[in-house]
Image (spheres, rainbow, N blue to C red):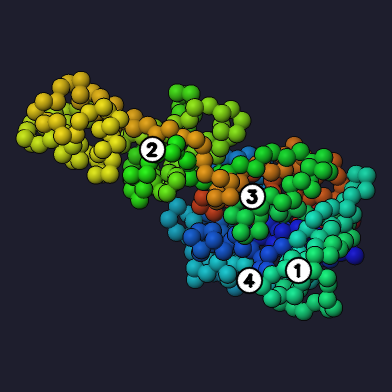
Amino acid sequence: MSNVIVIGGGAAGLMAGITAARQGAKVIVLERMREPGKKMMITGKGRCNITNSCDIKEFIPNIPGNGKFLFSALQQFTNEDLLRFFREQGLETVAERGGRVFPANGKAKDVIAALVSALEKAGGRLITNAQATGLVVKPGQVIGVRYRNVENDGRKEGQEYRSVTKGKVKLGAERTLDAEAVIVCTGGASYPGTGSDGNFVPVLENLGIAMEPLLPALVPLQPEEGFTEELEGLSLKNVEASVLADGKTVAKEFGELQFIRGGIAGPVCLTMSRKVARLQHFNHPDLELSLDLKPALPEDKLDARILRDSQEFSKASLKEIVRKLIPQPLVGPVLDAAYLDGNKPVSQITKNDRQELIRALKHFTIPLTGTRPVAEGIVTAGGVSLKEIDPKTMKAKRISGLYFAGEAMDVDGYTGGFNLQAAFSSGYVAGLNAAKQVLG
């Protein structure tokens, strides 16, 4: 019998398995995909943004989704501890803009290889193509995991990673592994092609584990149909973006955004998306995105600028004057928002026309239906309710031997390495305490 079974071979699961095995526990990590760490392969644009080099105290403000819950875990296993771990595995790292830390060679696969190697050296086993289907629980205690083998592109069912399994297992047959402790690291529901699709949520709910709805975070905002098609491909820098709910500002960010097919992306929108998703799910207010396209110019100075350009180019049309202020694709939409004719000679523009134009430039408003689907989110908000978990040990409060780590919990952060550090830290703490429990 294995002492500890980890469900999920991502960042949290591999670190949990490594830590538990290093304490002397017998560990099996079950991963439903053919290879572990699929989601790590796409972080940091394929380079794997391992962590952030900022002071560990700065992590909590950068984890708006219940970051305070991770205070103990981040102190127990810091970003410095994580980088020391990778150096010991022979993986060099480099810090770049914004403190983002990557493998020095830019290869995400080497991060995963280092984790797998560390697990194997510690005596842990990683079994891929093995999807957990349930937990075996007796009153108040977990005693095993049910799983089935997953068909794939030629790899044998249930084949152990980089090894050969003995005998053959009937495809799809459910099996049971006994365990003294189980660590759930099944991720959220974003990028389901990487193996995290929320499939384990019903299993936990059936055990009475309270769950928060799985919602997208770090995901493009979704405008009402027909409002941004002509802007697709446009990128804006140095804009102030605000989300309005029933006319009230609920979020505001400054920076870059991009209009993409079916959505509005970029750092400012991704940062505000968690708030939008929750409003969409729980409150259903009228949502709008308001853009200040000229944030550096107060309204009086913007008015003076328009007047000066109008006098200097007195024979120009209004749309030619507006083009001097904003990118061409925005000229038509802004004039429409101001109810102005772009072909009107600038010499005929009234003070009221200027005021309407200034309003449209400073408050260019796009109705929102919410966000893009959770499957498109970089991370998932929601998951196991933190009321169920002891933050110092990652242990379930009501079921002995059950632990949680990573994105399976209701914790999510901004881009920049904060989510992976949260996964590694919580995985470390879960693995440490699961081993302590089973080994006495």
Give the quarter of the image for residue 339. Answer: top left
Using the image, tell me which numbered label, if any, was put on residue 329. Answer: none
User: What whole-number distance in Å separates the C-alpha atoms at marks 1 and 2?
Assistant: 48 Å
- Image x and y of residue 326, in percent: 25, 41
Comparing labels 4 and 3, the label whose residue is closer to the camera: 3
Disc 1 + disc 2, Cβ < 8 Å: no
> As shown in the figure, which amino acid type bears the numbered disc 2?
Phe
The amino acid type found where label 1 is placed reads Ile
Please give left or right for residue 108 compared with residue 207 in the image: left
Q: Is residue 8 left or right of residue 216?
A: right
Residue behind mark 4: 113
Q: Return the residue found at the far right.
A: 139
Q: Secondary structure at mark 3?
A: loop
Q: Give the Cα separation between the discs numbered 1 and 3.
A: 22 Å
- Callout 3 touching callout 2 (CB < 8 Å): no
**Residue at image coords 43%, 39%:** 225
Q: Viewer-nearest of labels 1 and 4? A: 1
Crowd tier of the residue under label 4, counting other residues whose Cα lies within 10 Å: few below 14, some 14–19, many 20 or above: some
Q: Position of residue 109 (x, y in %)?
A: 58, 69
How far is the residue under mark 3 from the one under mark 2? 28 Å
Which label sits on residue 189?
3
Quick one: SS at disc 4? Answer: helix
Residue in view at x 87 percent, y 57 percent: 144
Residue assigned mark 1 = 127
Q: Earlier in the sequence, mark 1 or mark 2?
A: 1
Q: Secondary structure at mark 2?
A: loop
Seen in the picture, residue 76 relative to 215 is either above or below; the reply is below
Q: Nearer the viewer, mark 2 or mark 4?
A: 2
